[in-house]
Image (spheres, rainbow, N blue to C red):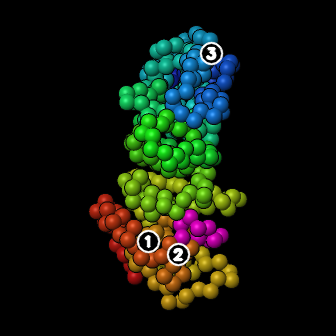
Amino acid sequence: LREESLRNAAFADSISVASSSLVSSLSMQHGPSFGQEMSASSAQDDPSVGQETSAGRRKFEAMATPMQTTAMALGALSEHLKAMVLSYVDVSTKVDAVRSVSPHLFQVLECRLAWEPLCIDQVVCKALLKELRRVCSLSSHDITLPVGLIKVHRLDVVLMDGEPDDTPHDDTEDDTTQPVSLRIADPTAEMLHNLDSWFTDVRELTMSNISIRIPHSVGLWVLRRTMLLKFGLVELVRSDGTPSAYSLLALRDTPPRAIDLEMTRKENRVRVPPGVQFDESTTFSVSEALYVAEHRSVYKNGTSFDVVGNDSMFFGDSVEVRRAYRPIVAILRQRFPQFLGVRK
């Protein structure tokens, strides 16, 4: 669609005028953005869904004044081209201000194309995770976000920082149901859970600001065999300049790296930090080789695995890794048989 429209001069001119008009008009909106509004609501220590946030809701529902000029500029475009124009507008502006242009334009946000790719910064990530946590606590699951947003195929997320866990630890025998906390203690697991339950159509996922403070129980192999099992290529790398953070790439329809055990042994040896006594008898199974291929900072030494930098997040022994990755290898062999032909 993009290539076809850009080849047509008339459509290209319309898109240029509409995009400039839309972005400049929406940038004049008054009031907080989507992420700022939700963060302001949560900043009051919103420990539960049961607390009233009606004032914040009213502000969230009425952000900016109508901009008829922008609506007219987009009026000549087809629905698909309107969605394409809106795909260049940031998430906060779309959620907060596009609805004020015209009801018809807001309906365009129901189209997936209007959100492709969905790029979420830390502020919007925090607002989105809290909103989905709130919705999941309701029996109706009445989500207030456009359907097109959760139907995207490409998702790029900069995770929010984790919040202190305020879950009460009460040893009393009171069976009263406690309100659901809106504090996000583990953004990585929370986002991947939403990927599994809400963003089910995602084909390309990039996620950054993954903290190593994640508990060992939700290490890479646990996430890989659960929430990331439907993806072919998965890679976790240490973020440049930030030793304590990682970035994740997951592609659903792309095959994993080809497994070559000899190349794995050579690459593993290069990863071993200086000063570490390396066991030259170290060998790899297919499951272990895939684990090392997907976790770009892991190395095996003898029968144990460690992470460059001595992080403990993904530490484990060969038995644990093989047990975790063996079913993953079996599934990937069924999907991509030609790419898991192992070379020794």
Where 62 sits versus 189, above or below?
above
The Cα–Cα distance between marks 2 and 1, rounded to whole angstroms, is 9 Å
Residue 64's mark? 3
The Cα–Cα distance between marks 2 and 3, rounded to whole angstroms, is 54 Å
Percent across and percent down for residue 308 are 62, 71
Percent across and percent down for residue 74 are 53, 17
The magenta segment is 307-315
The amino acid pointed to by label 2 is: Phe
Say whether residue 122 is visible: yes
Q: Which residue is at the far right?
A: 241
Q: Residue placed at 48% from the left, 37% from the top?
A: 178
Front one among 143 and 280:
143
Residue 22's mark? none
Q: Which residue is mark 1?
A: 321
Say whether residue 128 is visible: no
Q: Which residue is at the far front?
A: 173
The local secondary structure at tag 2 comes to strand
The local secondary structure at tag 1 comes to helix
Where 15 sits versus 276, above or below?
above
